């Protein structure tokens, strides 16, 4: 019995060390938003807690199979285990403490930051969805486009999302954020892009429907481009002049033109 405990103990420590090392290894897609960093941190914390529990069960299981298996046909059941020993009591206390810990962090501490909706964003982007395309509108600039989603880096952005037909889901993998697009209501995602980049260099920079919504679901994507504020202003300027889409857009784009001209 003493030998069993020693072998299991050493194997458990070794497996746990290996597991914790893997948790810290950066195997994640490039994080490109502030919320993404919160999410990866929470994910790593949960994994770090889970690894010792998982390896404990696995090591005991594998060791028991190797050491105490019956060779040939088993003729009877093993002896029943009864009572409230030290091991089950410790198991209960440790796992209960872990459960309470993750309710506090990431639960109570991290989750409110992730789901927070900006009340005073730097930029509002209205996202419309339908079978099977996305439409993005920048109400501050009177721009509507279906070709790409352009965002300024390091600005607080709130996406207000709606659907014209069935349930879709707004998902930009590189931002690690996702929310359903539901007909008849507006859902929102708030985040701050933290790195300049484009779909061409990172395929995770795309707006992808992630709710099976019919035949064209997989193709319901839109490239995302995160640019500097100056490049964003230039893009706004160019859009306002190349595509006079709706009459209400005209006065806004005219004033934007003036502002852009002064800045240059
Ligand atoms: Cu969809």
Image (cartoon, rainbow, N blue to C red):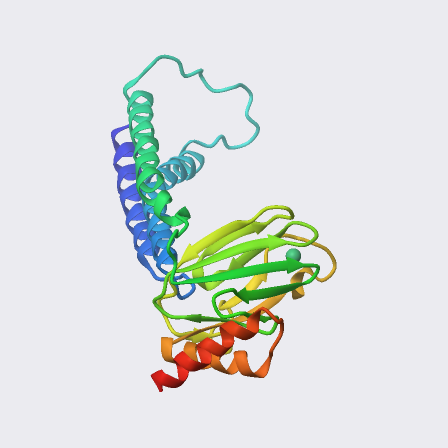
In which quadrant of the rendered image does the C terminus lie? bottom left
Where residue 222 appears, as percent x and y from the top left, is 58, 69
Residue at 36% over, 12% down: 83
Q: Is residue 238 left or right of residue 23?
A: right
| Residue situated in front as seen by the camera: 35 or 14 | 35
Residue found at x 51% / y 78%: 200
Residue sitting at 39 percent across and 37 percent down? 63
Q: Position of residue 6 (x, y in %)?
A: 25, 36
- Where 12 sits versus 171, above or below? above
Would you place residue 263 above or below residue 106 in this image?
below
Residue 213 percent coordinates (x, y): 69, 54
Residue 33 appears in which quarter of the rendering? bottom left
Q: Is residue 196 above or below residue 32?
A: below
Q: Quadrant of the N terminus?
A: top left
Extreme-top residue of the structure: 83
Decide which of 142, 57 is in the foreground and name it: 142
Nearer to us in this view, 154 or 247: 247
Snapshot quadrant of residue 10: top left
Closer to the camera, 54 or 10? Answer: 54
Q: Position of residue 9 (x, y in %)?
A: 27, 38
């Amino acid at each position: 019995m003493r030998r069993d405990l020693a072998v299991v103990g050493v194997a458990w420590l070794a497996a746990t060390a290996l597991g914790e090392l893997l948790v810290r290894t950066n195997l994640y897609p490039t994080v490109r938003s502030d919320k993404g960093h919160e999410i990866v941190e929470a994910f790593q914390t949960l994994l770090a807690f889970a690894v010792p529990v998982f390896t404990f069960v696995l090591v005991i299981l594998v060791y028991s199979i190797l050491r105490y298996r019956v060779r040939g046909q088993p003729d009877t059941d093993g002896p029943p285990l009864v009572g409230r020993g030290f091991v089950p009591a410790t198991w209960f206390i440790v796992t209960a403490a872990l459960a309470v810990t993750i309710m506090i962090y990431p639960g109570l501490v991290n989750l409110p930051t992730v789901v927070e909706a900006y009340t005073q964003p730097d930029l509002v982007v209205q996202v419309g969805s339908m079978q099977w395309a996305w439409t993005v509108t920048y109400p501050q600039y009177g721009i509507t486009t279906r070709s790409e989603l352009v965002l300024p880096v390091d600005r607080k952005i709130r996406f207000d999302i709606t659907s014209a037909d069935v349930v879709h889901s707004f998902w930009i993998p590189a931002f690690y954020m996702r929310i359903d697009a539901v007909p008849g209501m507006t859902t929102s995602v708030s985040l701050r892009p933290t790195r300049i980049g484009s779909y061409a260099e990172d395929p995770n920079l795309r707006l992808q429907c992630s709710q099976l919504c019919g035949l064209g679901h997989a193709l319901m994507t839109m490239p995302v481009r995160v640019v500097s504020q100056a490049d964003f202003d230039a893009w706004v300027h160019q859009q306002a002049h190349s595509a006079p889409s709706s009459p209400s857009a005209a006065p806004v784009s005219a004033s934007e033109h003036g502002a852009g001209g002064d800045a240059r």
